[in-house]
Amino acid sequence: MARRKINIQRNLGARTDAPNKPPSAIDQLTSSMATVDIGFEPTEQRVYMVNLDRIFPDSNQPRHLMPSDLRKQLIDNDATPAEVIRELLDRAEKDDPVALLVLGGKSDMALAEEEGDVEERGLFALASSIAEVGLRQPLNVYQIDDSSQPMQTRYRVGEGERRFWAHHVLVHQGQDAFKSVRCIIEALPKNPEIIYQRQAAENAARVDLPSIARARSMQRIKEQLVIEYNKTGNDKALSQRALQTAIGQQVKAFTGRAVGDRMVRNYLALLKLSSEAQDLAEAGELTEKQLRPIMRLKTEFERLMMIKEIIAKKWSSRQVAQQITPAAKSTPPPVTLLEVTKTTVEQRFEQRIINAAKTVASLMTLPTENYDLVVSTVASRAKDEKTHEALQALHDALGAILLKADDLVKRQYIELPITVIIPPLTELSQFLPKDKQTAIQPDQQSGAEILAKLINWHEADVVFSSRMHPFFKELETTADALRADETLPRPVVVQQVDDGEKRYLLNSGGYLYWAHLLLVQRGQTQFKTIMVELLS
C-alpha cells in the first residue's frame, strides 16, 4: 500500500506536454478519492521533470563521488557536470583507479568488507538499472535563485547525487530521454544549517556510507559545535575530548548507536590523508578499520601505495594490520640520504630520482678539489656533446651548492609578536573569491581584522563558506596541534624595514600564523607571540 501511495503521489505531480491525453487508470482512481475510502490521502509533495543541465551537486555534501580536482572545477564554475562526467569517463579509459571505482568499470577493483546484501556499486550499474526499469526514487532538489540568470531557475541536489550522475552517464551514452530527471522540488531553507542537519542525519544513518565521508560528516558537526561554543562567550578552551564526546552524542541522536570519543578521533584522523588518498579510499569504500593502520605509516606515498594494495588484493582490516604493524615497528627512519632505499619499483622515474640523489650525495662527501677533478676528468673523456654538456651542468650545480652551504646551516630563531608579521595571503588566495579579495588589504589591515572578516563571511555566506571550507579546516587542524603542543615546522620570515619600523614577511608557515591569531581571538593569550626562523 505504501508503494502504491508513493507512485500515485509521483504521477499526480508529474508534468506532461499532452494536456488532452485521456485520463489513466490512476487518474480515474485519484479523482474518486473524495468519495471512496482507500486508506490514504495525497500530500503536498509533487514530482516534476527537471532539465538535467539546471541541476548541480551540493559542494558541502560530505560524500564526494567525484575526485577532488573535478569537484574543485565544479565549485569554481570551471566545468559543468556534463564536462566533469566526460573527463571521468576519459580517465576510466586510461585505467585511472579512482574513475574505475566510481564508475564500476572493473569489478575486480571493487571491495566490500561487510557481508550481506550490498547496493550495486558503480555509476554504470546504477545507470543500467535506471535505463531498464526507470528512476524509482526521484531526486530531492532545492530551488536556487541565481542573480546572474534571473530568468532561469537552477536547482541544487539535496539527496540523490548518485542518481544525478547516473543520468549524466546515460546522456553521455546518447540516451537523450534522460536529459530530464524526476525531482521533488523544495524551497531552499532560509537557515542553511537545516540542510547540514538533514545531510548529517541521513549520512549518520547510512550503513554503507564510506568511512571518509563519515569522517567529513563528523568534521562538519565538530565545526558547528565549535561555532556554537564560541558564541557562548566562555573563556575556557573546549577540550578535544569533550568535543569528540559531543560529536559522538550527536551521531547517536541520529542513529541510536553510541560512538565513543576514541572512535570519533579515529574517524577525524582519516582527514589527514592527502586528497588523492582520500579520493581512492572513498571510491574503494574502505572502512575505518581498514584505514586505521595506514595512519601509522610515515609518508603520504606509503599510505597511498598501501590503499592501492588493499583495494587490489581485497585485504580485510585484519590483513591490513598484519601487513603494516611489522613494517611500522621494524623500519628505522633514514639517517642520511645514502641510507634511502627503494623498496618497491612502482615507477622507473622514481628509481632514477633516488639513484641521482645518491650520486649527488656521494660527490658532496668529497673535498671540493676532488669532486672538481673527478667531474672534469670524466667530462674530458665524454665522446658526445650532450654527455659533455650534462657533466658540465652537474659540475656547475655542485659548485653552486657548495658555495651556498654556509648559508644553509646558519639558522637564527627568534620569538616575535604576531602583530609585527605582515598578514600572508598565499593560503587564502587559492580559495578567496575575487569579489572578496578587494576587501582585504594586508598593508592597511591587521591580521586580526582580516581574520574577523573571514569568520563573519564564513558564518553569513553559504557560498563563501563552501569555497573557504578547506582553508578553515586546515586552520582548525593547525590550531588543535598548537594547543596540543605538537612539534610543528617553524615559520620562515624575512625582515623588512618600513619607515624605520621593523616588520616581517612570511616565506612559509602561513597556516601557523592564522592559527595563532585564531587562538588569540578565542582568548588564549599565550599565542600572542610566535617562534620563527629568521632569514638574513
Image (spheres, rainbow, N blue to C red):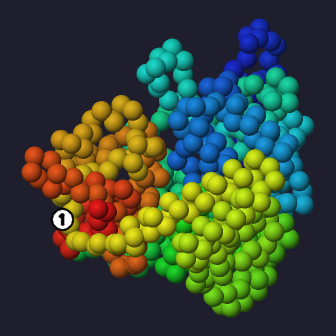
Looking at the picture, tell me which residue is in the foreground, 202 or 307: 307
Q: Is residue 174 visible to the viewer in this orientation of the structure?
A: yes
Q: Which residue lies under the disc numbered 1?
A: 417
Q: Which residue is drawn at 40% across and 55% down?
A: 472
Write down the quadrant of residue 490 in the picture: bottom left
Apparent side of residue 422 relative to residue 403 in the rendered image (left or right)? left
Q: Is residue 126 visible to the viewer in this orientation of the structure?
A: no
Apparent side of residue 172 relative to residue 417 in the rendered image (left or right)? right
Q: Residue at x 71, y 59 (%)?
A: 379
Apparent side of residue 158 relative to residue 235 in the rendered image (left or right)? right
Three-letter code for the amino acid on which mark 1 is drawn: Pro
Give the image location of residue 229, x and y in percent. Answer: 30, 65
Q: How many labels does the image show?
A: 1
Q: Is residue 429 above or below residue 262?
A: above
Write down the quadrant of residue 464 in the picture: top left
Q: Is residue 457 above or below residue 503?
A: above
Q: Residue at x 63, y 88 (%)?
A: 332
Q: In this view, does 7 lie above or below 109?
A: above
Secondary element type, mark 1? strand
Give the image location of residue 143, x and y in percent. Answer: 53, 30
Looking at the picture, tell me which residue is in the foreground, 505 or 138: 505
Give the image location of residue 203, x and y in percent. Answer: 60, 58
Give the image location of residue 285, x and y in percent. Answer: 73, 62
Q: Residue at x 75, y 48 (%)?
A: 386
Looking at the picture, tell me which residue is in the foreground, 301 or 86: 301
